[in-house]
Amino acid sequence: MILQAEPLNAAAFSPFGAVIGADPATAIEINEGFTTRFHRLAAADCDGKTILSIFRGRVRPLQVLMLERHPLGSQAFMPLGGHPWLTVVALSPEPAACRLFACRGDQGLQIAKGVWHHPLLVLEGAQDFLVVDRDSDGDNLEEVFFENPVSLAV
């Protein structure tokens, strides 16, 4: 099976979460007009404490061997380096349910609580992401491994 990349946009990604980016429809001028705030682009949905971290993704083979999900909290990823990257999401943990999105370097996303996804897929070198997710007691990680890899076409 080969997944074809589709551009990340709010409508296509809505079953899986939210796209995070500088949306002009949310712009509010603050600080005497010297700052534009792009307001309420996503809301963390975590049972327990919400934290901020930096994840450093590294290039890996463009294939999907597994999916994971976090039943107790959403995860938001915002790239810090401005480089394109990929995300694979699914509503059920099987290859046929997977969708591949090509994300621009200025696009982040929030994966909704309980949505299956592949770990970070960066396309060049090491890339840092600001991540908002959950840090509390309880098992917040489920993983499923595939018998055959799913190839990714970008």
Image (spheres, rainbow, N blue to C red):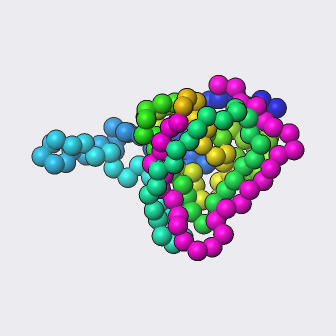
Is residue 130 left or right of 57 when viewed as pictured?
left
Residue at the image point whose x is 47% and y is 65% from the top: 50
Q: Which quadrant does the N terminus fall into?
A: top right
Q: Is residue 86 visible?
A: no
Q: Is residue 82 left or right of residue 18?
A: left
**Foreground residue, 36 or 24?**
36
Picture quarter with the C terminus: top right
Q: Position of residue 102 (x, y in %)?
A: 58, 31
In the picture, residue 123 is in which quadrant? Answer: top right
Question: Residue 48 in the image: x percent, y percent?
Answer: 51, 72
**Residue 131 percent across, percent down from the top left:** 48, 52
Q: Nearer the viewer, residue 95 or 136?
A: 136
Task: Name the outermost residue toward the top.
Answer: 154
Q: Main secondary structure of the magenta part?
A: strand
State the residue at coordinates (64%, 46%).
119
Check the image and report above or below for 40 versus 23.
below
Residue sitting farthest toward the left: 32
Q: What residue is shown at x 38% (from left), y 52% (from top)?
A: 40
Instruction: Reply above or below: 127 against 138.
Output: above
Say whether residue 80 is magenta: no
Tell me residue 8's x, y (percent): 55, 34
Tell me, yes or no, if residue 40 can be seen here.
yes
Q: Which residues are magenta?
A: 126-154
Residue lying at the far right in this picture: please name it: 147
Residue 113 left/right relative to 30: right
Judge whether residue 135 is colored magenta.
yes
Q: Residue at x 33, y 50 (%)?
A: 39
